[in-house]
Each structure stands twice: as C-alpha cells, then as structure tokens.
Image (cartoon, rainbow, N blue to C red):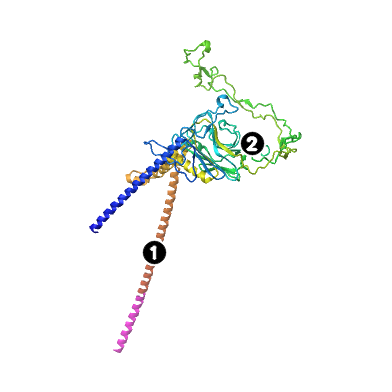
C-alpha cells in the first residue's frame, strides 16, 4: 500500500471514530432527556394524587425514586396497589392507584359487627400501604393488614358494575403471608350492586355476590369459592360452596412467598380455581356446589309416620331356644387358686411403704395453716430382699366353669320389613335454574377479615373478562415478584432444608439417600474376602488344619468353592483316564506291531532253513552228473 493510501485510511478511521462518538453522545443526551421527562411526569402525578387511566396499548413502565446509594429499582408495570376492571363492552378501563402514604380509593369501614361484644365488635384493625418486608422490588407497594387478633374491613368501588351476561368473569389478586398464617383468612368479597351500599358501613352482613380466597385455622387449609344464589321463587339468597380441592394447599400458606389466586367463571356454568396459574379445583355450578343450586324434584313427606307394627329388626332371639340345665349364671368369673402357697420369707408384719426417716419438716411449715406435718412415704427397704410384704392373700384365677348370663342365639327375623323411610312427594319449592352464572351484578370489592397473623400483603387486584389482559397483568406484577423471590433463594440445598423444616420426616429420606450409597461403597470396597492361602505363602506361617466357621455366608462360599474344586478334579480325572487309555492303546498297538514283525522274521528264517537242504541236494545231483560224464 502507498503512503498516500495509508494516510487516507487513517483519516477515514479517525472520521468514523469521531462520528461514532457523536452518535453515542447524542444517544446519551436523548436518554437523559427522556428520563427527565418521565421523572417530571411522575412528580406531577404524585403531586396531583389522581387516578391514572392506562390504555391497553400504552403500558409504559413507571419507575419509583430511590436513594443514590441503593441499586436501581426494577421496571414495574404497576407501581402499587392496583385495581383493574374490564367492562362488558370490552373497553379497557384500568385504575392504578399510585399510593405512597394513603389508601387512595380504598375506604376503611367504620361499622361494627352484629352479635358481638362491644370490645371486639369494632373494625379497628389497621391497614397500611407499604412495601413487603424483604422485597426485592423497590417501590412496589401493596395493601397490608397490620393488626393481629382484630377485625378488619376495607373496600373500593369498581369503575363500573360487572354484569353477568355472555362473557366470563375472571378475578385475580396476590397474597403474601409475610409472618406465616396461624388462624385467619385472606379472601375477598365481590360486593353486590345495591341501592344502600355504603362502603363506610361495610361489615360482615353486607350483601356480596362472590367470596373467594385462602383461609386457614388449625390444620384446615381452605380455598373458598362461595356465591350467593337467588331463589327465583322466594327471592331469598342462599350460599353455595364449591367442593373442596384435592390439592394439598399447606405449602402455599406457609412458604412466605407471594402467590397468585385466580377464579374463572364461564357463561356455560363451568369454573376454575387457580394458584400461581395452576388449576387446583374445577367443576360446574350445577353439579359441584353444596347445597346444589337446584332443589330435588321430590322430597320425603314430612307428615308421613312409621306404622307401629313395622318391624325393621334383621335379627331376633330364637324363641325356641332353651337355657341348658348345667348353665350356672351365678358362677363367679374369678376364684381363689387352691394350689397357691405363700412364698417363704414373706414378711406379713412389714408394710410396703414406710415414712422417710431422713425427711425433715420445712422451716416455714405452719401447723395451724398447713396441718400436722407427716414425712413422705418411701418403699420399705426390708421388702427389697423379701418376696413380699404385708398380709399375704391367695391369688385369683379364671373360673373354668364361668359362662356368664345366658342369651338365646340370634336368628333371621321372618317378619323383617327393612328400614322404614317416609314416602316421596313432589317438592313444593322445586325450581330449575339452568343459568346460575347470571348472578347479581358486582359493584365493589372488599376485604372483611379477622386474623391471628399480621402483615398480610395484598396487591394487584383485577376483575376482568379478557384472559389475555389478566395474564399480562399477572406477568407484569406477580411474575416480577416470583422472579425476584426465586433469585433470592439459597439454592437447592436451602430449598431442601426449608422443606425439611416444614416436613420433619424428610430428614429420614435425606439420611437414607446419603447413607445408603456410602454403606454400599464400604461393603463392596472394604470388606472383600482375602485369600488365606496366599497370606500363608507370603508369611510362611503354618496353616492350621481346622478352621472355625465364620458365618453362613462363608460356609456357602466354601461349599461353592468345594463344588467347583470337585468339578475341576472330576475333569482332571477324566482327562487322566483319557490320556491313560490313549497310552494303553498306543502300547497295545506297538506290541501288536512288534509281534507282527517277529512273526514275519520267523517266517523268513523258516523259509531260509527250508531253502538250505534243497540247495545241498541240488549240489549233490550236480556232482553226480559230473562224475558220470567223466
């Protein structure tokens, strides 16, 4: 590259860096300006102390002020106690009451309970708006029940009444039992729309449409869902209770965490009860309420009476049975033992207990006030070495002839008519309401509680018809709390320890889980059987001929070893016999070969012997022929 090109490249890099720094500077200025605007809006809102109307599409985060030394607060969608209501027209009207030191739209009741003593009839329990004790979401405040063992009542109007038509009803709010829960509730009441509803006079008899939420006393953990149903014939209201949940609710009430309680009612009369967005109970208003919404068509006739001769005894005494002649009803159950003999050395004249000779009368004993002083009684020391003290009595034994009072045996009743029941008649109060979902409209929400626990934290109430809105509300509120509480936990070990504190029997499980593997490792690695013969070979120590038995397992192992040795010896014997038979066969074959060779040699010698005389005779003939020719 040329020197000019390098200079151009350096200038270009410097220019790019300069522009980048300018962009960063502008970005910082924009952020600072936006922060200042948001901060100014927050201050204006706090000064005006007015309700904020948020649109569903515009959910800008609201941040609270913090001290410079503290860490910055997390971004919160809803700053404090919040109450939302979604109207039947599907318009999004939401009220978020930004509370600092006052209760805003919440009104504390000044009424008194009926049928209660004057001292406890007042709703004098204290309410405060404050953060949770161990909160990780700085600036997130809620409604807190502060007093212990007092009656509390507080309520707030909805923006508009909720009408039960063709849209579902969803109720949701958060609860945190910061100090645990001994006896008391944290349920809410959705107050009915009536002409005489005055929140300052809200008390236990104020008409409500739905009561929902947690309640606990002793070891009874409940999650209420109750609605008041209007009788279409009489116009009277009757409470209908949902069936109890099969889920164990104890952990939700005792873990000191924030939990989300939700109730969903649908126009088809189905309902769902949820904790932390998990269904814990469900059913139908027509089938799963007690007492049922619709009365039975027939009832028992209240004027019907059982006939005097009606016999509903399945068994009767046998009238033909007769007591045996030898049955003695007067014989005693116990009789003296005729074979008993007083033990030797029995001290008849000595009492079992005597006065303590070492006891002394207290200095402050007043005989006029306390009576004559007597030393305490102790066991007679003379009776310790004797078989007994005091007058000896013959022991009692069971009477073999005792039979007790005679009773005739029971037989089937021939006149048995069964259990009598009154006849059925048509129910004059019968009606059929197939749409119990259409309840009395709701105009306000209230908390009317008595609790032995203090510092119960409530937050983010919502009454709505749109599940998406409710889910978003839960994510922006309870979701942040759950994340913060989860990050503050001490890991898996801490969770296991806290679980064991609530359920002590888990310690046994933990011990077994830890001890069992350790025990197995010790058994398999440290208690292996040593080869005794090898040890004797190493040390040249004399090996005893007789060994003591060390247990059933060693005997079984020895037996198995003996069997294996016998099998090996049997195999060796079979191999030796096989080899021996092979050698014998080979020897026999060799002998046969030698015998055959010897026979062949004998035959050759015999042939030689036969050929010699023939040769001599031939020579003699030749000699004779020669002599004749001469």
Position of 164 relative to 448 (above/below): below
Q: Which residues are magenta?
A: 606-630
Q: Position of residue 218 (x, y in %)?
A: 54, 32
Q: Was residue 154 drawn as part of the magenta stretch in this picture?
A: no
Question: Marks 2 and 1, Cα distance to the nearest angstrom?
Answer: 117 Å
Asked if marks 2 and 1 touch (Cβ < 8 Å), the reply is no
Judging depth in this view, the residue of 247 and 389 nearest the camera is 247
Position of 420 relative to 26 (above/below): above
The image quadrant of residue 431 is top right
Q: Nearer the viewer, mark 2 or mark 1?
A: 2
Q: Position of residue 47 (x, y in %)?
A: 45, 35
Judging depth in this view, the residue of 630 and 229 nearest the camera is 229
Q: Was residue 629 drawn as part of the magenta stretch in this picture?
A: yes
Q: Position of residue 552 (x, y in %)?
A: 45, 43
User: How many residues crowd mark 1 within 10 Å: few (<14), some (14–19), many (20+)?
Assistant: few
Q: Which residue is mark 2?
A: 237
Residue furthest to the bottom in view is 629
Position of 484 relative to 366 (above/below): below
Left or right of 465 in this view: 232 = right
Kindly tell me whether residue 60 is visible in this rendering: yes
| Quadrant, the C terminus | bottom left
| Quadrant, the N terminus | bottom left
Q: Which residue is mark 1?
A: 586
Residue occupying image coordinates x 34% and y 81%: 617
Number of numbered discs visible in the structure rendering: 2
> Which of pointers 2 and 1 lies earlier in the amino acid sequence?
2
Left or right of 289 in this view: 497 = left
Majority secondary structure of magenta residues = helix
Kindly tell me whether residue 544 is visible in this rendering: no
């Amino acid at each position: 590259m040329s020197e000019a090109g390098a200079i151009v490249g350096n200038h270009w890099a410097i220019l790019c860096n300069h522009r980048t720094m300018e962009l960063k500077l502008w970005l910082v200025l924009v952020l600072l300006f936006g922060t200042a605007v948001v901060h100014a809006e927050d201050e204006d809102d706090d000064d005006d102390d007015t309700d904020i109307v948020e649109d569903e599409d515009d959910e800008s985060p609201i941040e609270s002020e913090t001290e410079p030394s503290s860490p910055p607060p997390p971004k919160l969608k809803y700053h404090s106690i919040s109450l939302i209501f979604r109207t039947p027209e599907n318009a999004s009207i939401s009220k978020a009451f930004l509370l600092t030191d006052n209760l805003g739209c919440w009104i504390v009741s000044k009424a008194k309970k009926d049928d209660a003593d004057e001292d406890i009839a007042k709703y004098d329990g204290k309410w405060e708006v404050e953060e949770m004790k161990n909160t990780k979401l700085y600036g997130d405040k809620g409604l807190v029940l502060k007093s212990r063992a007092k009656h509390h009542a507080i309520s707030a109007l909805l923006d508009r009444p909720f009408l039960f038509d063709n849209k579902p009803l969803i109720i949701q709010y958060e609860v945190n039992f910061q100090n645990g829960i001994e006896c008391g509730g944290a349920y809410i009441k959705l107050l009915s729309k009536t002409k005489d509803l005055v929140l300052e006079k809200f008390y236990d008899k104020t008409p409500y449409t739905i009561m929902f939420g947690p309640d606990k006393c002793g070891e009874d953990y409940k999650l209420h869902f109750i609605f008041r149903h209007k009788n279409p014939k009489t116009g009277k209201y009757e409470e209908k209770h949902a069936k109890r949940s099969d889920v164990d609710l104890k952990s939700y009430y005792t873990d000191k965490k924030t939990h989300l309680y939700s109730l969903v009612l649908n126009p088809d009369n189905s309902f769902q009860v949820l904790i932390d967005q998990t269904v814990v109970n469900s059913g139908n208003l027509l089938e799963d309420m007690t007492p049922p919404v619709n009365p039975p068509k027939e009832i028992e006739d209240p004027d019907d009476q059982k006939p005097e001769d009606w016999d509903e005894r399945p068994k009767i005494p046998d009238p033909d049975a007769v007591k045996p002649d030898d049955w003695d009803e007067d014989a005693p159950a116990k009789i003296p033992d005729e074979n008993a003999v007083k033990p030797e050395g029995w001290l008849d004249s000595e009492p079992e207990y005597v006065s303590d000779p070492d006891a002394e009368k207290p200095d402050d004993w007043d005989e006029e006030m306390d009576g004559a002083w007597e030393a305490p009684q102790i066991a007679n020391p003379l009776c310790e070495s004797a078989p007994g003290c005091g007058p000896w009595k013959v022991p009692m034994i069971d009477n073999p002839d005792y039979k007790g009072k005679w009773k005739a045996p029971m037989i089937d009743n021939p006149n048995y008519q069964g259990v009598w029941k009154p006849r059925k008649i048509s129910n004059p109060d019968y009606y059929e309401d197939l749409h119990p979902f259409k309840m009395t409209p709701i105009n306000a929400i209230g908390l009317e509680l008595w609790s032995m626990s203090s510092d119960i934290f409530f937050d983010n109430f919502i009454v709505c018809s749109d599940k998406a809105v409710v889910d978003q509300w839960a994510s922006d509120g309870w979701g942040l709390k759950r994340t913060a509480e989860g990050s503050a936990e001490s890991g898996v070990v801490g969770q296991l320890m806290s679980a064991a504190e609530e359920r002590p029997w888990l310690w046994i499980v933990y011990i077994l889980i830890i001890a069992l593997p350790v025990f197995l490792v010790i058994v398999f690695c440290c208690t292996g059987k040593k080869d005794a013969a090898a040890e004797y070979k190493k040390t040249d120590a004399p090996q005893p001929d007789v060994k003591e038995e060390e247990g059933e397992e060693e005997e079984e192992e020895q037996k198995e070893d003996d069997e294996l040795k016998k099998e090996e010896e049997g195999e060796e014997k079979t191999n030796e016999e096989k080899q021996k038979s092979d050698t014998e066969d080979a020897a026999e074959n060799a002998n046969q070969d030698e015998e055959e060779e010897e026979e062949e040699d004998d035959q050759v010698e015999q042939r030689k012997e036969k050929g010699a005389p023939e040769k001599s005779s031939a020579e003699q003939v030749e000699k004779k022929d020669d002599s004749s020719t001469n």
